[in-house]
Each structure stands twice: as structure tokens, then as C-alpha cells.
Image: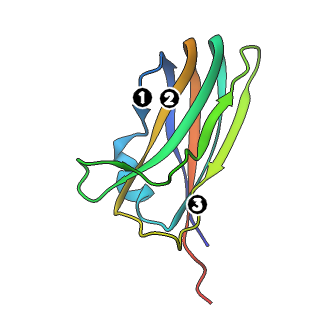
């Protein structure tokens, strides 16, 4: 069952250093069994730009670990002439426990990449039934 749909990142990213979703959403993102991520990029520049988004989770808001073995959005090639839509989702929520806090780690790849990125997260819980 869907619990929330929230814009968690809206910004211009320049370079390959990791940036993170807004910390004010860490509690919200950690409150559900499964996250789906959707969004788009625009005004992208660089040579062979890519986007990777990973869900990280934490029990103390200090130590963060990857939620899954592979990135939820993994090295998607980005258009430099238009918008690129992206989507991904958390794996099987029954496979492992969810820690209380979560965030998105966003990285661009390629040579001198930059671009506008907007990402929404949809939180879902297992349907009782």
C-alpha cells in the first residue's frame, strides 16, 4: 500500500561527487518497507554523462550503508539534448530489515557532467491481508 509520494531532491549537480536527498526526509524515507524512485534530468552537459542513485539507510543518522547490493538506478545514460526520465525501486522488502532512516545518494558519471535532477520517492508498505 502506498504511504507517501514526495519530491526529495531538486537541484543542479555539477561534477562526480556524491550529493544526497534533503535530510529533512530521512525519517520519512526510512518509515516504509519499500521505496520506488522516479524522476528526470534536464540541461545535462558533459561527455557520456550517467546517473546513479542508491538508497542508503542508517540506524543513527551518522553511519550509512547501502540498502541493496546494486544501485536502484544504475549508471543510466543521460541525454544532453533533452530530458531523461529515470526510475528504480528497492528490492524485495522481505529479504532484509529496514533501518529507521534512509536517504538517496546521487552521483553523476562521465567527463565533467552536470545537470538539473528532480527525484521523487514513493514509500510503500507490505499489504496486510
For image coordinates 67% across by 32% down, the residue present is 76
Q: Name the element at disc 1.
A: loop
Q: Residues within 10 Å of mark 2 (few under 14, many from 20)?
A: many
Give the labeled residue for mark 3. Answer: 91
Assign the N terminus to one quadrant of the image.
bottom right
Would residue 82 be found to the left or right of residue 23 on screen?
right
Q: Residues within 10 Å of mark 3 (few under 14, many from 20)?
A: some
Tally of numbered discs: 3
Sequence order check, earlier mark of 1 and 3: 1
Question: Which colour assignment does the render follow?
Answer: rainbow
Give the labeled residue for mark 1. Answer: 18
Displayed quadrant of residue 122:
bottom right
Q: How far, Cα to Cα, is label 3 from label 2?
A: 20 Å
Q: How far, Cα to Cα, is label 1 from label 3?
A: 22 Å
- Looking at the rendered structure, which numbered label has been put on residue 111? none
Q: How far, Cα to Cα, is label 2 from label 1?
A: 5 Å
Assign the C terminus to one quadrant of the image.
bottom right
Sequence order check, earlier mark of 3 and 2: 3
- Looking at the rendered structure, which numbered label has been put on residue 107? 2
For image coordinates 37% across by 51% down, the residue present is 26
Residue at the outermost bottom position:
129
- Of residues 83 and 96, the one nearer the viewer is 96
Image x and y of residue 67, in percent? 45, 54
Q: Check if mark 2's residue and mark 1's residue have beta carbons within 8 Å.
A: yes
Amino acid at each position: 500500500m502506498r504511504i507517501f509520494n514526495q519530491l526529495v531532491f531538486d537541484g543542479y549537480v555539477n561534477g562526480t561527487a556524491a550529493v544526497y536527498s534533503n535530510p529533512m526526509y530521512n525519517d520519512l524515507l526510512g518509515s516504509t518497507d519499500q521505496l520506488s524512485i522516479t524522476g528526470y534530468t534536464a540541461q545535462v552537459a558533459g561527455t557520456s554523462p550517467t546517473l546513479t542513485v542508491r538508497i542508503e539507510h542508517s540506524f543513527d543518522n551518522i553511519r550509512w550503508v547501502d540498502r541493496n547490493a546494486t544501485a536502484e538506478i544504475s549508471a543510466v545514460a543521460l541525454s544532453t539534448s533533452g530530458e531523461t526520465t529515470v526510475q528504480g525501486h528497492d528490492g524485495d522488502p522481505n529479504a532484509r530489515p529496514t533501518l529507521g532512516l534512509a536517504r538517496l545518494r546521487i552521483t553523476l558519471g562521465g567527463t565533467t557532467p552536470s545537470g538539473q535532477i528532480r527525484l521523487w520517492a514513493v514509500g510503500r508498505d507490505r499489504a496486510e491481508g
